[in-house]
Amino acid sequence: MDTQEVKTPDEQAETEIIENIQSDGALSEAEQQIIALKDQLLRALAENENTRRRGQKDKEDALKYGVTNLARDIIGVADNLQRVLENKSAASDEVNTNELSKALFSGVDLILKDLTSIFGRHGIQRIEASGQQFDPHSHQAVFEQETDEHTPGAVVQVIQDGYKIHERLLRPAMVAVAKAKVEKAEGAA
C-alpha cells in the first residue's frame, strides 16, 4: 500500500484555510511594514522641508542683520560727532575761534581713532596705497601724473582711501599713478 497521506475534504479545506491565514498574515505584515516606511518617509520629507525653511530664514536674517555689531559700534561714532557739533555751536559764543578750532579738531581726531579701532575689531583695514606700485586688484587709477621723482606705475597721490574686510576688497583706493615725463623736442611750438 501507498503510505501517501489522504486527506478528507474537511481536512483539505482546513489546510487551505490555514495556508490562506498564513498568507494573509504575511500580506498584512508586509502592508504594515509599507505603512510604517511610508510614515517614516513622510516624516523625513517634512523634517527636510522644515530644515530648508529654517536655513532660508537664517540666511535672510544673516543678510539682513549680519552687520548688527558693526552698526552698534558705529552708532557711538555718530553720537560723538553729534556731540562735537552741539558743543561747537554752544561754545562759539564763549570761546575764541582759535581755541574752538583746536577743540573741534581734537574731538574729530578722537572720533577718527575710535572709528579706526572699530574697523580693526570688525576686520576692516585701510589699504596703504601711497608710494606703492599700482595694483589693479586694490587701486583704481583716476589719472596719471608725469613725474621724475617716482618710478612709472607708482602711486603718487591717494585721492580716496580704499578698504578691505579681511582679505576681500570693500572699495579700491582711488589713486594718481606716476608716468615718465615726456621730453619735449626743442624748437617745437
Image (cartoon, helix red, strand yellow):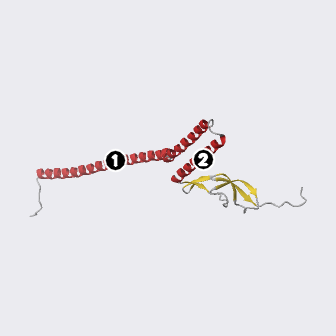
Residue 79 percent across, percent down from the top left: 54, 41
Determine the image quadrant of residue 177.
bottom right
Residue at 40% across, 46% down: 49
Is the residue marked by circle 2 packed among few (<14), some (14-19), or many (20+) residues within 10 Å?
A: few
Residue 71 percent across, percent down from the top left: 51, 45
Q: Which residue is mark 2?
A: 106
Residue at 65% across, 40% down: 96
Checking the image for residue 43, the label placed there is 1
Q: Amino acid at mark 2?
A: Ser
Q: Nearer the viewer, mark 2 or mark 1?
A: 2
Checking the image for residue 184, the label placed there is none
Q: Helix or strand or loop: what does disc 2 sit on? A: helix
Is the residue marked by circle 1 packed among few (<14), some (14-19), or many (20+) residues within 10 Å?
A: few
Q: Amino acid at mark 1?
A: Arg
Q: Helix or strand or loop: what does disc 1 sit on? A: helix
> Residue extending furthest right?
187
Pick the residue in front: 12 or 99.
99
33 displayed left or right of 163: left
Give whichever of discs 2 and 1 has the lower sequence position: 1
Residue at 55% across, 43% down: 80
Q: Please state, as top left, top right, bottom left or bottom right, where the N terminus lies in the image.
A: bottom left
161 displayed left or right of 188: left
Residue 55 percent across, percent down from the top left: 43, 48
144 displayed left or right of 14: right
Q: CA distance from mark 2 to mark 1?
A: 65 Å
Establish if 120 lies above or below 97.
below
Residue 169 visible in the current orientation:
no
